[in-house]
Image (cartoon, coloured by chain):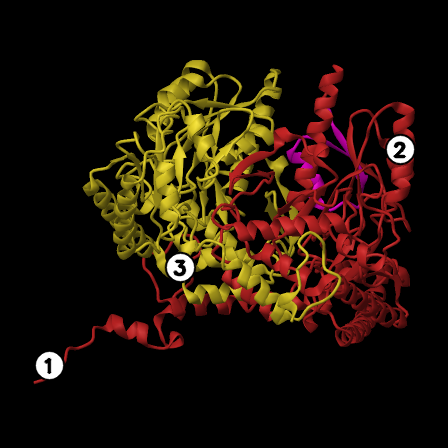
Amino acid sequence: MHLGHHTTKFRMPENTIPKEAAYQIINDELMLDGNPRLNLASFVTTWMEPECDKLMMAAINKNYVDMDEYPVTTELQNRCVNMIAHLFNAPLGESEAAVGVGTVGSSEAIMLAGLAFKRKWQNKRKAEGKPYDKPNIVTGANVQVCWEKFARYFEVELKEVNLREGYYVMDPEKAVELVDENTICVAAILGSTLNGEFEDVKLLNDLLIKKNSETGWDVPIHVDAASGGFIAPFLYPELEWDFRLPLVKSINVSGHKYGLVYAGIGWNIWRSKEDLPEELIFHINYLGTDQPTFTLNFSKGSSQVIAQYYQLIRLGFEGYKNVMENCQENAMVLKEGLERTGRFTIVSKDNGIPLVAFSLKDHSRHDEFELSHHLRRFGWIVPAYTMPADAQHITVLRVVIREDFSRGLAERLVLDIEKVLRELDALPPNGKSMKRPADVANCHAALANGHVAKRLETDKKTNAIC
Amino acid sequence: MVLSKAVPSSHDASLSCTFASRYVRNPLPRFKLPEESIPKEAAYQVINDELMLDGNPRLNLASFVTTWMEPECDKLIMAALNKNYVDMDEYPITTELQNRCVNMIAHLFNAPIGEDETAVGVSTVGSSEAIMLAGLAFKRKWQNKRKAEGKPYDKPNIVTGANVQVCWEKFARYFEVELKEVKLKEGYYVMDPEKAADMVDENTICVAAILGSTLTGEFEDVKKLNDLLTQKNKETGWNVPIHVDAASGGFIAPFLYKDLVWDFRLPLVKSINVSGHKYGLVYAGVGWVVWRSKEDLPDELVFHINYLGADQPTFTLNFSKGSSQIIAQYYQFIRLGFEGYKNIIENCMENAKVLHKGIEQTGRFNIVSKEEGVPLVAFELKDKTYYTVFDISENLRRFGWIVPAYTMPADAQHIAVLRVVVREDFSCSLAERLASDIQKVVEELDERVKHVTKVVTTQVDITASGGTDGALVHKSEQEIAEEVITYWKKFVNRKKTSGVC
């Protein structure tokens, strides 16, 4: 009976309805959402073991911030911080506690890291009697949108190193050139959103040490390892990108990407206490001891923290390694399948995040946005993007390989892409492919899947997907 | 012929019962990622068991945050756990549900929007994020105005009461805004509108009023503040706006106190935040902030995402996050409707009254909270000589109850209260049980004090008789009592900051 009523959309209804009806109405509407497991746009985990689901449901009514009431949950967070700090080779003594925090995601983590750098730099400049009103941060133009948010909301200038065709990450030499006395830090990305590449943090470190010794400045590095932080230690343990490099002062990683937890958890680790100005920390007294906290969010669920701990002890080093190796394998299967069609250039590297970014060799008749649109009909969500400045003429499709993207799915995707190519070949050309990238983006905005985040006043595209 | 193979011992490990396996013998990894994987049943059991030592969320009377939802809603929450809210394009319905919630809340708060106009608002992880966004909007608006006037814009400040929740202090510290706090005084535990208007100056980006003070549940007089501020604005030519922190009160006032004018009906109120996870009746992890109109949210702060061909503006600090709580909020709105919320809040008020009466009947406490406001009971000891509210709080734990004790902020730091928040799932019988357990604790503490005083007195007599010049040294009863208190206080010496939402 209630299903026949028009559910008011903008105003709270006057009357109560039975819980079964409420459930059914919402459940049915949500059937029209995309299937998270077929969402190949996202790095964020979409499957966990039922045992973990059980733990999460049991913890759903625990407000994480009530440290006093839920001391074990707080303890689990602390253990995760320590495990991740050790994974990143933080210079800690045997029983020394790591300096770090659980956040809602890498956005919050980055804002906290950025705040710490800003405050540290301000204090130093004040002590030197120099102006401290124009802080800036140096990154590549390939940064994820949360860096732009940080810059805008916390009043720091963002100095971006532009990309170029064939080189889609931050060039360490150009980055170091952009550094000046107002630079609070240089942010390197381990696992670029666009093509999964790892930036050369070691080269950046070496060049920056040299610049620091020449100028007397003390510019540090932050590594945005949102995706790469849970990949590099398992697949590329020899790669030096973390606290082994002396200038790296903080690292963020998303628990909900290759940390293999559902959306809603990130981590930020500082090298040591000195890198986190005390004045930013709020001290809450719990169980008679001091629990320092530094987060933007306060009340939030505990489920994801517990889930992260579950994954860390359930999988252990070998488990994570196996999962990442599987992802790499499946990425190779997909890549080779695409290469065999002869229609694509592969833009992503083999080393890095397990994803495949590819563009059409021939844009004369159709483009990547159309391909993406057609793939939707098969159920696949594969986003198409244009690169940021100065490579805006390059458009790519990107498939992220997550834990739950099996080989069978990889092979099926290749088949479906081939089908779509055949369909498109049979269609007349859209006549728009040769236009400028901004126009392309505009024309296809309605068709495309919205991964092009545009500020309507400027041409600069922000990449709005984590 | 059937060939049998011996099953390698590693198989046994996964077949055997968790408690028979080696996994419950090994110490739990605490500092380093363990080398090996363990079976999922073992991982589940080991974590589940340790978590048994956490407090019971339903008996956590310290928190406003919802601790129970209907199983149907739990089902929806579970199903949405793997949806990343920010993927608006992939999950258009979930995004639509958020938009509906924003509109419903905006209308609930009487935002001046036309029939087909969409409200300006956003879902957040909680009121902390909501407040930071609102504060950012005020700061940017004020800065732009000052720049246009050619005046300095480097010293923004915000005026609030000293009773503000810690997230305002965070906002001030992280976004470099000065916090000008109106001090409280004994008997008046919220922001005084007159003192607040006095503190306003040309650098004030906004005045923040609280609907539902964390400490006592009281609603601040937003209307009076609005009137005083309107006058001050006229006199000075400034344009200082108001933000209402309705984290708790936003889902109470519209249902219980319809005639209370506190929201967008007041012209100076430009934004309001409310916690979905408090009396919005959703689990931890959702808050809302609504702006009066587009003009109150500077466009330069908004990021525009193109989805389904339409512009979806977003203004949040967090990016990826779960969708479950948003769906749960929408569930509650359509499931309960206006009448459902009203019934629940009325029940809470009733149960708060039951508790209030029960506590008063012990004869040992003064009730500090008001009858109107958030359904909670805050009470202090009439006689603090022998033990404090902190002792009571400590002892109530043994019965399973978590009832926090706080000292008031400046200038009423000598007042310490216990506070019980009455949530949806705090029934009348629980209220009666709590009152009787409080009575028990008070009686126990009385006994203990009597016992210790006797012992100390005996000791003093013995030592007194052994004085060097033979004269008896008598300690006054007061001195003895003080010694006893100091002795016991050592165990319960903690000053709690009101760090609880």
What is the chain letter for disc 2?
Answer: B
Q: Front-most of A378 and B481?
A: A378
Front position among marks 2 and 1 = 2
Labels 2 and 1 in the same subunit: yes
Using the image, determine if residue B10 lies above or below residue B37: below
Q: Which residue does the numbered mark 1 point to in the structure image?
A: B3
Q: What is the x, y in percent for residue B44?
A: 44, 67
Nearer to us: label 3 or label 1: 1
Chain corresponding to red in the figure: B
For mark 3, name the chain: A
> Which one of the lettered chains is coloured yellow?
A
CA distance separating discs 2 and 1: 93 Å
**Is residue B499 in sight in this rendering?**
no
Horizontal side, residue B114 vs residue B303: left or right: right
Q: What percent of the width, then of the height, locates residue A441?
A: 44, 31
Q: Residues within 10 Å of mark 1 (few under 14, many from 20)?
A: few
